Amino acid sequence: MKLINKKTNKATNEFNQVIVGNSLTKDAWRRLKKNKMAVISVVIVTIYILLAITAPILPIYPYDEIILDHQHLPPSMTRNAGDLLMEKRMADLFTQAWRQGRLEVTVEEEDMLWNWIDRNEANKVWDYMFEKGTKMMSEGTFSFNSAEERRIKSLENKIKTELQITVKKMWYTPIDSDKRIDITSLDNDEILALYAQMIGSDVTAQMNQYEAEIEQQLNKKITSTNPDLTKEEYAILLEAEIEGLSDSEKRSLIKENLMGKIKTNVREIALMDLEQKALDGTAQFPLKEEIAIKGVISANIEASKMHERQYYLGTDYQGRDMLSRIIYGGQVSIAIGFIGTITSVLIGIVLGALAGYLGGKVDYIIMRIVDIMYGLPYMLLVIIAMAIFGRNIVNLFFALAIISWLTVSRMVRGQIMSLKNQEFIEAARSMGAPTWRIIMKHLVPNSLSVIIVFSTLRIPSFIMTESFLSFLGLGVQAPFASWGSLVGDGVGGMNLYPWKLFFPALTMTIFLFAMNFLGDGLRDAFDPQSKNQL
């Protein structure tokens, strides 16, 4: 029996104790907190999402920055890229000396080394020869010849002087004024005149040059998307592409081209000045400073020694930082998982709710469409969609989501059919509530627990599907990366460079396990009486 406490105006029981209301969500959260694996999974998923969101402000190297000298550098927590490059060069020279017979080894060592080579385990050969050669040099039983010493000296100078310079911002100061103007705010004619003044060239000549470069850029884009065409066909497509550009797009391309040239010129001027400082040690790196060019242009630059970088997870085949690519790859993979799931769930909720509540012909038509699509090979449809609409991230979202709503619609339809004859629905119907209100305000909210659980379990499925497509070369395209594309890149050299496969695969595996444990925890929390039946 419920009573009302006049002082607090709250419902009480026969002992005058306030009755605290409960809800399915609160009850589910209480049970979920008791599931340790689910709680750990929540923490892991939250960390992944935070890393993906904050990637642009994290102190990591750009994910698409290519440094060919840093190809295939192994992971290291203590040694920088210069140390690894020197070790790699020394190991290579020691190995060459062994093959030339100048670095002697025992018969057992010889057999071991050739056995590694036969098994395509060259890394073991280089590591062993580096240790062996370093030991023999310290003992005085081996020395490099003059040509090898020159190569080592050249690499030492390169490590000391090679700089990575980033132009952060550039200003233009007119001769008759002290006011500095951001170059990006100038119009194209002013930027062109400024660039011609920088390099001491004619404006007309530079105009002809950037027009030719823009044509080359468009032609390269057409060639990459339409291979195996004739020159005449490429020319027709290029002309159509140029004519199809709006005035704003043309201005944007021109400005992008000119700004790139000015930045390159500024970078070269800064490099000439700072390389000598790096060699004689008169500057401390990394540094930030402002430089002046021709008296009218100034730029803020950041410079660091390229070979002092540390790659905690190694580098890939183009010298890009694996840590950075895994974090940015997480952006794409997690976005595909969440956006694909949300899109498919929304489509499934709408169609499933209409089929379940309205019944009759509507239910028959929707369910027959679902049955037909179930009979088609899912992955083949996704591959065909990617082939028709093009390989980019937006089309990948569309291709994955457009087929994945089938199970959601059936599940929602079943839930709606079990609820639509309940008393609270009859009450809403008798009060004149319209169909859309009954569905969206009563039926769907009472089905949310099952939908949430199903959605959590679908996210890993989307990520795995994207990974499979990227592995086949039909998913995310360069310069973007996803966990699947990184795994695909790492498979080719897994014997020589195992870290390229191990780290992205481990990262993806941990996230998928966490999502599955979270989904299981949510299922048990929302419906403890029907464990493992969803």
Image: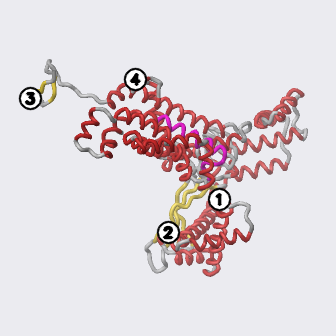
The residue where tag 3 is placed is: 6
The residue stretch that appears in magenta: 456-478
Give the foreground label among 3 and 2.
3
Mark 4 or mark 1, which is nearer to you?
Answer: 4
Label 2 near label 3: C-beta < 8 Å?
A: no
Per the model, the C-alpha gap separating discs 1 and 3 is 83 Å
Q: Quadrant of residue 88?
A: top right
Real-space Cα separation, disc 4 to disc 2, in angstroms: 60 Å
Residue position marked by numbered label 1 in the rendering: 275
Dot in front, 4 or 3? 4
Residue drawn at (29%, 30%) of the image: 23
Query: Which amino acid type corresponds to the residue marked 2 in the rendered image?
Result: Thr
Query: Where does the image place residue 219, in percent across and percent down from the top left?
Result: 67, 67
Is label 1 or label 3 in front? 3
Are the residues tagged 1 and 3 within 8 Å (C-beta)? no
Question: Mark 4 belongs to which amino acid?
Answer: Pro
Label 2 vs label 1: CA separation?
28 Å
Q: CA distance from mark 4 to mark 3?
A: 38 Å
Q: Specify which label sits upstream in the sequence, 3 or 2.
A: 3
Question: Would you place residue 477 above or below residue 241 in this image?
Answer: above
Question: Is label 4 in contact with label 2 (beta carbons under 8 Å)?
Answer: no
Which of the two labelled residues, at mark 4 and mark 2, occupies the earlier sequence position? 2
467 is within the stretch colored magenta: yes
